[in-house]
């Protein structure tokens, strides 16, 4: 990483409590990530790996208790520098046993008031987010152009309506929505999913944020529209050089748009490094989970080499019952006799195995 990180997440833990099971759902359990200014960090992993909850934790939008219980999120742009989890320890008391969190006592209401105060000048203005379902993220009772106007008036120096409207029209044109003046007055229900997503991108970027979080920006769209949205994001990245945290199940989009990749599983990061190393089929030093993800992608090469579509054996980790050893141990097909006992009993740390390349695996440490 050549530039100083604009966002640095350290040992982030976001838990939820299941009353039925009387256990914590450890959705994010010790995540550490960095994003340098101007780069795109792609985050991949199966459903339930903690990708979206990590993004929502950064935005201060995990409303269900207890939510964020520990960690540090440092955000530094040209305009501000602050810990987004400022004063969190004042609201949380943890009970530990054998190094594990057994009980959480949190003043959720007090923390949410504190988080709103901290995030007031950050959310929207400094960090903007594109959500998974664009239609549900837009106000169904307000024309899309006016929603972009409201964001501009709230988060930029532009306050009068004529200027805000012209700025909104410029951004609608910039994200390649046809007939911007006509679409300005359209309601979300009259637009396609792809056009709603373009509107969300326009709304996010119109406020000129330092960091854009895109959570599954192509989910739910057909293949053609997915490709067009990916092209649009690539063009905007090249044009604006905006720092982006990109979350997606689509490894093809991650490969195309990301400079670096973080692979998540079971609420934590298993691998973090350059895209060309982690997502390249020819690069050998990658985590067994990353290798399994790549092997499961439907492709002519995979079918020629294996004869059938590959699948990762076993079930996704239940984050209410995290084992004491490696979280991927029960599904891993690369365990050797030399490291088997360690894999079963001791969780590996995230360690550097190459320049800017970190892995959480005993295969590379022993």
Image: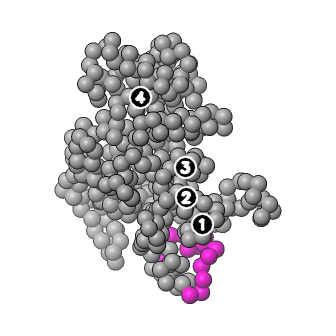
Mark 3, residue position: 254
User: What whole-number distance in Å separates the C-alpha atoms at marks 2 and 1?
Assistant: 8 Å
The boundaries of the magenta stretch are 319-338
User: What whole-number distance in Å separates the C-alpha atoms at marks 4 and 2?
Assistant: 31 Å
Q: Secondary structure at mark 3?
A: helix
The answer to whether any part of residue 320 appears in the image is no
Mark 2 crowd level (few <14, some 14–19, many ≥20, 10 Å Cα): some
Disc nearer the start of the sequence (3/2): 3
Q: Which mark is residue 276?
A: 2
Q: Which mark's residue is nearer the viewer, 1 or 3?
A: 1
Q: Which mark's residue is nearer the viewer, 4 or 1?
A: 1
Mark 4, residue position: 203
SS majority, magenta: loop
Residue at image x 31%, y 39%? 126
Mark 1 crowd level (few <14, some 14–19, many ≥20, 10 Å Cα): few
Q: Secondary structure at mark 1?
A: loop
Q: Which mark is residue 283?
A: 1
* Residue 183: image location, x then y, percent: 51, 16
Disc nearer the start of the sequence (4/1): 4
307 horizontally vs 321: left or right? right
Q: Per the image, is 325 magenta?
A: yes
Residue at image x 56%, y 87%? 338
* Residue 163: image location, x then y, percent: 32, 15
Nearest to the observer: residue 239 or residue 82: 239
* Residue 232: image location, x then y, percent: 53, 34
């Amino acid at each position: 990483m050549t530039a100083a990180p604009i966002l640095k997440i350290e040992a982030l833990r976001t838990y939820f409590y299941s009353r039925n099971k009387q256990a914590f759902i450890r959705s994010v359990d010790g995540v550490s990530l960095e994003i340098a200014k101007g780069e795109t960090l792609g985050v991949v992993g199966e459903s339930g790996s903690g990708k979206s909850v990590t993004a929502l934790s950064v935005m201060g939008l995990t409303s269900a208790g207890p939510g964020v219980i520990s960690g540090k999120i440092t955000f530094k742009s040209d305009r501000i520098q602050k810990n987004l989890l400022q004063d969190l320890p004042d609201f949380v008391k943890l009970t530990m046993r054998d190094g594990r969190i057994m009980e959480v006592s949190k003043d959720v209401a007090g923390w949410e008031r504190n988080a709103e105060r901290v995030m007031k000048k950050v959310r929207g203005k400094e960090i903007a987010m594109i959500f998974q379902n664009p239609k549900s993220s837009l106000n169904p009772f307000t024309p899309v152009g006016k929603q972009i106007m409201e964001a501009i008036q709230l988060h930029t120096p532009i306050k009068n309506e004529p200027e805000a409207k012209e700025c909104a029209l410029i951004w609608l044109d910039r994200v390649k929505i046809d007939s911007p003046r006509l679409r300005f007055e359209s309601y979300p229900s009259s637009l396609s999913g792809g056009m709603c997503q373009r509107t969300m991108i326009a709304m996010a970027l119109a406020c000129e944020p330092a960091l854009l979080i895109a959570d599954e920006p192509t989910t739910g769209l057909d293949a053609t529209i997915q490709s067009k949205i990916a092209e649009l994001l690539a063009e905007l990245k090249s044009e604006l050089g905006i720092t982006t945290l990109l979350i997606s199940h689509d490894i093809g989009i991650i490969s195309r748009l990301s400079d670096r990749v973080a692979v998540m599983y079971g609420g934590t990061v298993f691998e973090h490094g350059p895209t060309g190393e982690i997502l390249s089929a020819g690069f050998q030093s990658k985590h067994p989970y990353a290798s399994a993800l790549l092997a499961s992608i439907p492709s002519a090469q995979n079918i020629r080499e294996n004869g059938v579509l590959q699948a990762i054996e076993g079930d996704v980790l239940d984050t209410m019952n995290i084992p004491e050893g490696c979280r991927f141990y029960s599904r891993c097909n690369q365990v050797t006799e030399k490291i088997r006992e360690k894999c079963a009993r001791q969780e590996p740390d995230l360690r550097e195995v190459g320049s800017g390349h970190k892995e959480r695996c005993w295969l590379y440490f022993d």
